[in-house]
Image (spheres, grey):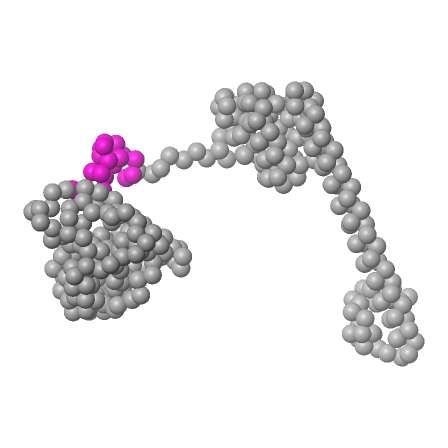
Amino acid sequence: MPSACAGGRIRSDISPGGTVSKKKTTTTPTPHDAAFRSFLANPDVARDFLELHLPAEYRQLCDLSTLKLEPATFVEPDLHQYASDILWSVKTTGGEDGYVYTLIEHQSTENLYMPFRMLRYSVAAMQRHLEQHKTLPLVIPVLFYHGERSPYPYSMNWLDCFENPALAAKIYTKPFPLVDITVVDDNEIMNHRRMAALTLLMKHIRHRDMMELLDKLPQVMVEISDEQVRVLIHYIVNAGDSVSPEFMRALAERLPQHEDKLMTIAERLEQKGRQEGRMEGRMEGRMEGALEKALAIACQLQKMGMTPEQIKQATGLSDDELKKITH
């Protein structure tokens, strides 16, 4: 079984054929909906349906004798507006728990974009699955069609919904392009034109010492607009792990056209540092005062003949702190 079928989980979307209607505030079931839903909610009928219509290579993965009707709550809210849902769970023939999902919508006209709609259903099921599991499940969409036009006139390959199916197949059947700046040398990033400043900062934003960027960053910041410089400065201040006033002052010296703004930020950082220092000092003072008070109480308790263990329980002092009154 392919690795995409994690934990033996199998899902099948079964949808009657039809066009995608616009979002509705209310939905009125048709006689077709009621009849199809009633039949597919029956486990014997559902088993017959899946035995008849699932491709053999998928059907042999499922133990259809274990079908169990489940609440169909995994579909995204917008899909609920035009879908009648029936959910069956089933175990795989390998003995592991698995699922067959039947998403039942009844519309009797053909639809060029039906494969894309079924893909949406499938992705919604996968997303719901990921809320409680670590891997994507396998989803098997099946279309039930009984429209007036025969045979069904459109492809069931969702890639054929594109103007250029061959190009779409290349994009969606291969790994997506990855831009991993963590492995790109800084000197190469310097040649990334108007992306260089942002890329360089995002690569190093978590570094404790931003001073190492002072030689390179000003060179690439001259390539971008004043508004983009403002955005980057805001990014440095808010996302950086440790942005110092010294860094901002040094950057201001190298970017005189932005000196006023950078110096203002440096002053604010210094003010913030002073405020934090004062707060830490007051906190340390309060802690020292509380310790002195506890030690004084401990001395009195010791004079009253209490044991060290009793004194610790009464004052909350540690062994090391208690030693200060025993010497």
Q: Nearer the viewer, residue 216 or 152?
A: 152
How far across and how far down the image is residue 97, in percent? 30, 64
* 113 in relation to 257, above or below: below
How far across and how far down the image is residue 156, in percent? 17, 45
The residue sitting at the bottom extreme is 305
* 325 in relation to 139, above or below: below
> Magenta region's main secondary structure?
helix
Q: Residue at x 54, y 20 (%)?
A: 223
Quarter occupied by residue 104: bottom left
Q: How many marks?
A: 0
Q: Residue at x 30, y 56 (%)?
A: 26
Q: Quadrant of the C terminus?
A: bottom right
The residue sitting at the left extreme is 150
> Would residue 66 be visible to someone looking at this image?
yes
How far across and how far down the image is residue 121, in percent? 28, 51
Q: Residue at x 19, y 56 (%)?
A: 106
Q: Nearer the viewer, residue 49 or 206?
A: 49
Q: Residue at x 89, y 79 (%)?
A: 305
Q: Quadrant of the N terminus?
A: bottom left
How far across and how far down the image is residue 160, in percent? 20, 38
Name the side, left or right, on which 182 lies relative to 274: left
Q: Nearer the viewer, residue 145 or 147?
A: 147
Quarter occupied by residue 249: top right
> Would residue 250 be visible to someone looking at this image?
no
The segment highlighted magenta reads 155-173
Residue 285: within the magenta? no
Name the side, left or right, on which 295 lies relative to 272: right
Name the side, left or right, on which 68 lies relative to 204: left
Quarter occupied by residue 65: bottom left
Name the side, left or right, on which 203 lies relative to 59: right
